[in-house]
Amino acid sequence: MSEHTVQLWIDGQALRISAGVSLLAALEQIDLALGNSPGGAPRGAFCAMGVCQECRLRVDGRPGVLACMTLVRDGMRVERRR
Ligand code: FES
């Protein structure tokens, strides 16, 4: 494993991501939305500074984790909203 990347599990799929970035930035790097709206459209972040709560995801089994305020770490398991 490179020092400069971490492995995340996103919806059960292993992906290598640059280290030292927020989870929101990581999802943007690999062109993944936060999830889908009830109508099926991809959901994105709004404020990217911890205010709007639009980026809440389940991380390592914990619901409501703000992707924009959470740094990626090796082995992190992320479930996007569906
Ligand atoms: S994008 Fe607004 S709280 Fe994360």
Image (spheres, rainbow, N blue to C red):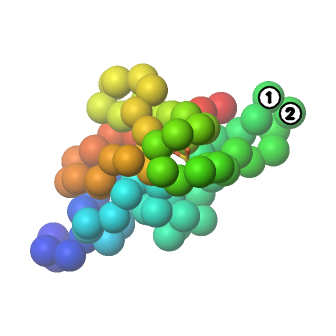
Left or right, residue 19 beside residue 17: left
The amino acid at mark 2 is Gly
- Say if residue 74 shows up in the picture: yes
Q: Quadrant of the C terminus?
A: top right
Residue positioned 38% across, 47% down in the render? 69
Give whichever of 32, 24 is nearer the camera: 24
Q: SS class of the residue under badge 1? A: loop
Q: Quadrant of the N terminus?
A: bottom left
Residue positioned 33% across, 47% down in the render? 70
Q: CA distance from mark 1 to mark 2?
A: 4 Å
Q: Does any atom of ligand 1 lie closer than 8 Å to the CB of label 2?
A: no
Give whichever of 52, 1 is nearer the camera: 52
Q: Is residue 44 above or below residue 12?
A: below
Q: Which residue has dot 2 on it?
A: 39
Residue positioned 50% across, 70% down in the render? 29
Q: Position of residue 2 (x, y in %)?
A: 17, 76
The amino acid at mark 1 is Pro
Quarter of the view holding residue 58: top left
Q: Which residue has dot 1 on it?
A: 38
Tell whether label 2 touches label 1 (CB within 8 Å).
yes
Left or right, residue 20 beside residue 10: left
Give whichever of 38, 64 is nearer the camera: 64
Quarter of the view holding residue 43: top right
- Say if residue 11 shows up in the picture: no
Q: SS class of the residue under badge 2? A: loop
